[in-house]
Amino acid sequence: MFENLTDRLTLTLKRLRGQGRLTEDNIQETLREVRMALLEADVALPVVREFIDRVRARAVGQEVLQSLTPGQALVKVVHEELIAVMGEANDGLNLRSQPPAVILMAGLQGSGKTTSTGKLARWLIERQKKSVLVASCDIYRPAAIDQLQTLAREVGAEFFPSTNTQDPVDIARAAVEQARRQVIDVVIVDTAGRLHIDTEMMAEIQRVHAALNPIETLFVVDSMTGQDAANTAKAFNDALPLTGVILTKTDGDARGGAALSIRTITGKPIKFLGVGEKSAALELFHPDRVASRMLGMGDVLSLVEEAERKVDRAKVEKLAGKLKTGKRFDLEDFRDQLQQMMGMGGLSGLLDKLPGVGDIPKEVRSQVNDRELVRMVAMINSMTPQERQHPDVIKGSRRRRIALGSGTQVQDLNRMLKQFTQMQKMMKRMSKGGMSKMLRGMKGKMPFPMP
């Protein structure tokens, strides 16, 4: 996420850290580079101008010039101003209303609106412990209603059936009435999108909004459209009283222009980030954490929160007990570790949140391949229980059978077994001497799969 912007900003600010002191000249040169980085990230020009002016005003003042580490102080200023551009803190959903609380989803076709409706339903069910009903007012796009029904089934939400012959306002009203009868906490109404903003579309969604008077009206927009995302959000905000934005497809957005433009142009907060295709791939938008990622500082808080939610504690405790009693780390344990890593967004998701990611060469980061995790699990699944528990028995004919059964090559299996052996050695060191010995044993090498 935002790789290009992260690379440019960290490289620019790293050059400044070596300076003994800051002068107006080197501040000016650094801000020129920062300005170019932001423009290349497709941040809207007015936003760039305001951002640079604010940083310059603070950087040439006493705050930086009297600092013992002026380069670091300028990084701090840039970090704080990035947060200010995106909003000081996360603006959570406002669900304080007589149930059911109604959330209206708006956006252009192709922005990920229906998928985001399913993701938001899952987030509310799992994180907020709410009961949720979803309804589709999209009577134009083929299979839109069926898609939402499938998503509702997947995430455990109630689904209100509708047809493409009904009026969107009637659908919305009936859905809310059913939720009221069933004492459901939240209703999420998915509306129709268009390929572009038009009068007919706006008139329809305004009618739906007037009929529902939703407590939240969320605009769903594709982050990869850059500053156009902010401009489209502004057009919707002029027609509807938006309360926030869901920025989708950020896992594929190497620039970050939308995230840095929307708040300034629309005045509305980004509330969520869509970070993948799966229904669990929705994150609260925390401006301070995103700013840290943009500067290559990582996002340890999100990493810890994700681990607390997704790591299977029973398996962790079982493995710890196993190692404590001197039993060997085997391929079944290794598979558990791989699956838990996949559940936390894979290697790329973890790497994005680790501090110092900007110092890792781009060509090394580009080699991180989450599909390799899936292949490794497939190889382990192709083994017999005896082979998983006693990897030493996996020789010639067994290797060919396992590779054939998992759709891989023998050399792939050889590489996976080598990585397993490295992990096994680390686990042995950890069981004997704790984490510090394990880290020393790693010698800077991570046993993560690379292609």
Image (spheres, rainbow, N blue to C red):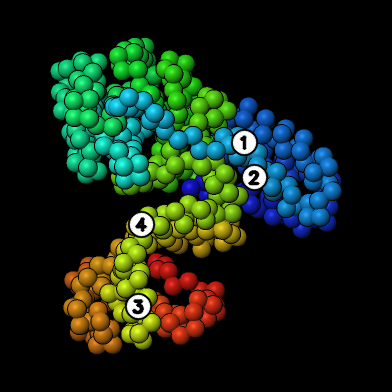
> Is 41 on the left or on the right of 110, as rendered?
right
Local packing at callout 1 (Cα closer than 10 Å; few below 14, some 14-19, many 20+) is: some
The residue indicated by pointer 2 is 79
Q: Name the spot of residue 207 as percent of width and height, x first.
A: 31, 12
Local packing at callout 2 (Cα closer than 10 Å; few below 14, some 14-19, many 20+) is: many
Q: CA distance from mark 4 to mark 2?
A: 29 Å
Q: For the residue labelled by badge 3, is the local secondary structure a helix, a strand or a loop?
A: helix
Front in this rendered view, residue 348 or 310: 310
The residue indicated by pointer 3 is 321
Q: Earlier in the sequence, mark 4 or mark 1?
A: 1
Local packing at callout 4 (Cα closer than 10 Å; few below 14, some 14-19, many 20+) is: some
The amino acid type found where label 1 is placed reads Ala
Front in this rendered view, residue 70 or 368: 70
Q: Earlier in the sequence, mark 1 or mark 2?
A: 2
The residue indicated by pointer 4 is 310
Q: Name the spot of residue 411 as percent of width and height, x first.
A: 32, 76
The residue indicated by pointer 1 is 84
Q: Name the spot of residue 410 as percent of width and height, x first.
A: 28, 77
Q: Earlier in the sequence, mark 3 or mark 4?
A: 4
Q: Nearer the viewer, mark 3 or mark 4?
A: 3
Q: Nearer the viewer, mark 4 or mark 1?
A: 4
The amino acid type found where label 2 is placed reads His
Q: CA distance from mark 1 to mark 2?
A: 9 Å
The quarter of the picture where residue 333 lies is bottom left
